[in-house]
């Protein structure tokens, strides 16, 4: 009995000793959290944050992502209740501006290096109308056509340089028994964001023309928009049988198993095909003959700090590090394949396919996804118009008229 009592006393004494590990309160280490919608990036971000801890050994930043579809609502709930993360991913344009105006995102304008080391176009998605910045640009994504190089070589085919050549290529592949495109409609967002918005600058022009549609100087049902809708309607015949019920994951599998020759998608998918048993590459969605091919290079994510964080100096120091060449280089080395640094410093990526994606921008105008800067209210109407159009339920003119009416 005395032995048991002695053991209990020892255990009790041990339990009262200070905790010196794992970022405990007595360790002197300050523990910050980072919110994100990138639930797939835990491994990469943990590596990046471990590298930062070498720079700031007294600070630990814990990456705590949320399911992408729930991020906006979950983050707002956390911020409203005072339980928001210290650092967090910030959506671009209106969605981010709303949280800044609500007082949740801190003013990042005077963070050293921010205004100097990023171009005006890369700052713009996280900039208020008065010039204040609410986040540090972190990564962009691109849109292109993935293609099976082995099939192209076998069939003696080449990368098309115009939209008309692209449709002819699709026709040739289909006539030779191939499923041409892996794209489907079931998840809805991807056919709009990856395909339609990816090709749209080829038909209506880049940023300078986009602004004219935003202000109403140009109509959303003009001949250029109708031509773009007709183009997306024209490719429906080259999608898999039953494409209406095909999910995004199904599409990835079709391309990865060589059951479809091409897949119009975003650069973030590049890592999925790392171990593909065939040679593949990417090419820019081509513009109609007589127009210049443009690339949808979308400013996808930035990182900001909570205006109410208990650790403003530590959060600010991390953001400042991301504005340096050292921080941006380490970040680029730990970003998932297909996410590209937006800082001005020349940073070489290790993955050849990532570099191939980036090379598509050379000599071409780039722009964000059309609705993001000022027309997010049109996202749902445009998405449904594209889907109905590809299902053959409406015409290109009707699609354009529907979306134009939704703006008025």
Image (cartoon, helix red, strand yellow):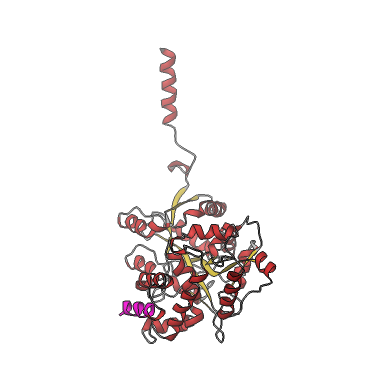
Image location (x, y in percent) of residue 130:
38, 77
**Which quadrant, please, contains the C terminus?**
bottom left
* Magenta highlight range: 398-408
Residue reaching furthest to the top: 1
Residue closest to the eye, 3 or 349: 349
Image location (x, y in percent) of residue 340:
56, 66
Which residue: 66% across, 59% down?
Answer: 278
Image quadrant assignment for residue 74: bottom left
**How many numbered marks, from 0 up?**
0
Classify 252 as above or below 132: above
In the rendered structure, does residue 109 fall within the stretch colored magenta?
Answer: no
**Which quadrant, please, contains the N terminus?**
top left
Residue closest to the eye, 13 or 298: 298
Classify 24 as above or below 192: above
Instruction: Please indicate, yes or no, whether residue 78 appears anywhere in the rendered image.
Output: yes
Image quadrant assignment for residue 79: bottom left
In the rendered structure, does residue 407 fall within the stretch colored magenta?
Answer: yes
Classify 237 as above or below 44: below
Image quadrant assignment for residue 90: bottom left
Image location (x, y in percent) of residue 53:
54, 52
Instruction: Please indicate, yes or no, whether residue 347 appears anywhere in the rendered image.
Output: no
Classify 227 as above or below 240: below
Image location (x, y in percent) of residue 398:
37, 79
Q: Main secondary structure of the magenta part?
A: helix
């Amino acid at each position: 009995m005395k032995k048991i009592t002695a053991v209990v006393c020892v255990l009790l004494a041990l339990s009262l000793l200070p905790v010196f590990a794992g970022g405990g309160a007595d360790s002197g280490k300050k523990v910050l959290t980072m919110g994100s919608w990138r639930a797939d990036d835990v491994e990469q971000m943990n590596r990046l944050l471990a590298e930062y801890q070498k720079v700031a050994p007294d600070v630990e930043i814990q990456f705590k992502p949320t399911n992408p579809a729930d991020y906006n609502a979950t983050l707002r709930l956390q911020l409203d209740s005072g339980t928001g993360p210290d650092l967090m991913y910030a959506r671009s344009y209106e969605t981010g501006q709303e949280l800044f105006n609500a007082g949740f995102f801190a003013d990042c304008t005077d963070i050293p290096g921010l205004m100097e080391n990023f171009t005006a176009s890369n700052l713009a998605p996280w900039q208020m109308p008065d010039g204040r910045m609410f986040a540090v640009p972190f990564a962009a994504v691109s849109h292109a056509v993935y293609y099976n190089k082995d099939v192209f070589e076998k069939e003696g085919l080449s990368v098309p340089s115009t939209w008309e050549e692209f449709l002819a290529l699709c026709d040739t592949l289909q006539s030779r028994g191939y499923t041409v495109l892996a794209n489907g409609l079931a998840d809805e967002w991807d056919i709009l964001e990856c395909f339609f918005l990816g090709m749209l600058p080829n038909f209506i022009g880049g940023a300078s023309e986009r602004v004219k549609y935003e202000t109403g100087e140009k109509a959303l049902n003009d001949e250029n928009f109708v031509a773009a809708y007709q183009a997306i309607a024209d490719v429906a015949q080259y999608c898999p049988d039953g494409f209406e019920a095909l999910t995004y994951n199904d599409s990835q599998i079709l391309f990865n198993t060589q059951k479809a020759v091409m897949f119009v998608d975003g650069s973030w998918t590049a890592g999925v095909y790392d171990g593909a048993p065939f040679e593949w590459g990417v090419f820019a969605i081509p513009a109609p003959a007589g127009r210049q091919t443009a690339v949808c290079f979308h400013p996808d994510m930035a990182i900001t700090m909570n205006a109410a964080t208990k650790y403003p100096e530590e959060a600010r120091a991390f953001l400042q590090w991301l504005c340096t060449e050292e921080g941006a280089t380490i970040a680029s080395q730990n970003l998932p394949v297909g996410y590209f640094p937006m800082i001005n410093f020349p940073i070489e990526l290790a993955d050849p396919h990532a570099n191939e994606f980036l090379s598509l921008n050379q000599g071409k105008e780039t722009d964000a996804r059309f609705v993001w800067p000022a027309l997010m209210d049109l996202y749902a109407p445009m998405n449904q118009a594209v889907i109905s159009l590809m299902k053959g339920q409406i015409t290109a003119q009707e699609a354009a008229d529907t979306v134009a009416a939704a703006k008025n």
